[in-house]
Image (cartoon, rainbow, N blue to C red):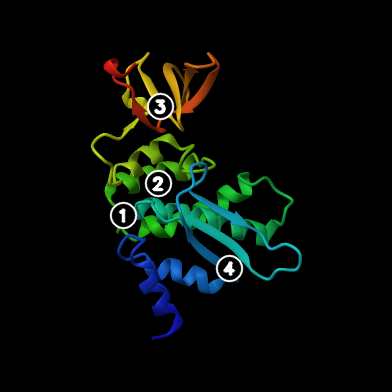
């Protein structure tokens, strides 16, 4: 078995069927160290350019993502790599140059016809209104989450009624008004206000628990 086939076999558990070759070819095309990591609360993936004489780029993707989120995040990070190769540090991380590279990576995935229609439609929309990440693209993030294996008790903030109380990262909040893609929420202990993403995973505080 050659290196490409080994990579395809290793990627099979993380990617939708039919996309193993696409990602394996990217890994072989560029000098990149690709890591599948434990879940990170603040990011789905990450790209790091070579520093201090290093030869390899570094890409990491959270290993707990559903297969479609894993694919989109991986293509997102490779778009960063390709932007760096073409423009170096002269451009913004999610500027027009990156958006162009990201669209260039998304289009072949859409063209395969292997993606579920809701995801294909959401990605088509993102081609014309590209956001910095699938998290900031609320519609795309919402569609991708449809394919998560969610516990029955797991909720997102947008599913709660106004003034409901919830726990996020060990702190208690009350849900307020929607501000674009985030809700203005009050931390109960300090009365400070925070903007929390509509799709943040939270734990509802029941009335009898207050």
Position in image of residue 138 (x %, y %): 42, 35
Question: Which residue is farthest left?
Answer: 152
Disc nearer the start of the sequence (2/4): 4
Mark 3 or mark 1: whose residue is earlier in sequence: 1
Distance from label 1 to label 4 (Cα)? 26 Å
**Crowd tier of the residue under label 4, counting other residues whose Cα lies within 10 Å: few below 14, some 14–19, many 20 or above:** many
Q: Are marks 2 and 4 in contact (CB under 8 Å)?
A: no
In the rendered image, the vertical position of residue 130 relative to residue 196, given as above or below? below
Q: Residue 167 bears which disc, if any?
A: 3
Q: Position of residue 96 (x, y in %)?
A: 62, 45
Kindly state the secondary structure of the residue where label 4 is placed.
Answer: strand
Asked whether, in this view, residue 200 is left or right of residue 207, the answer is right
| Residue 41 horizontal side relative to residue 96, left or right | left
Return the residue at label 1: 115
Q: Quick check: marks 1 and 2 in contact, CB under 8 Å?
A: yes
Closer mark to the observer between disc 3 and disc 4: 3
Give me the C-alpha separation between circle 3 and circle 1.
Answer: 34 Å
SS category of the residue bearing label 3: strand
Disc 2 marks which residue? 123
User: Upstream in the sequence, badge 3 or badge 2?
Assistant: 2
Specify the quadrant that holds the C terminus: top left
Which residue sits at x=54%, y=42%? 132
Quadrant for residue 32, please give it. bottom right
Residue 61: image tag: none
**SS at mark 1 in the image:** loop
> Along the polypeptide, which appears first: circle 3 or circle 4?
4
Measured from the top left, where is residue 65 in percent x and y? 38, 51
Nearer the observer: mark 3 or 1; the answer is 3
Image vertical order of residue 17 relative to residue 136, above or below: below
C-alpha distance separating marks 1 and 2 = 10 Å
80 above or below 119?
below
Local crowd at mark 3 within 10 Å, few (<14), some, or many (≥20)? some
């Amino acid at each position: 078995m050659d290196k490409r086939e080994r990579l395809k076999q290793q990627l099979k558990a993380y990617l939708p069927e039919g996309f193993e070759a696409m990602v394996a070819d990217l890994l072989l095309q560029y000098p990149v160290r690709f890591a599948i990591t434990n879940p990170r609360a603040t990011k789905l993936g990450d790209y790091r350019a070579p520093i201090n004489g290093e030869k390899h780029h570094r890409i990491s993707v959270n290993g707990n993502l559903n297969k479609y989120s894993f694919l989109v995040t991986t293509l997102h990070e490779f778009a960063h790599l390709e932007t760096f190769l073409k423009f170096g540090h002269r451009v913004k991380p999610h500027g027009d140059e990156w958006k162009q590279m990201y669209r260039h990576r998304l289009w072949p995935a859409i063209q395969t016809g292997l993606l579920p229609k809701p995801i294909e439609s959401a990605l088509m929309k993102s081609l014309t209104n590209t956001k910095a990440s699938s998290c900031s693209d609320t519609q795309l993030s919402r569609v991708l989450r449809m394919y998560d294996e969610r516990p029955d008790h797991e909720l997102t903030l947008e599913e709660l009624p106004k003034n409901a109380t919830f726990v996020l990262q060990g702190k208690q909040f009350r849900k307020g008004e929607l501000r674009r893609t985030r809700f203005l929420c009050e931390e109960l202990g300090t009365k400070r206000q925070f903007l929390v993403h509509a799709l943040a995973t939270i734990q509802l505080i029941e009335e009898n628990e207050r």
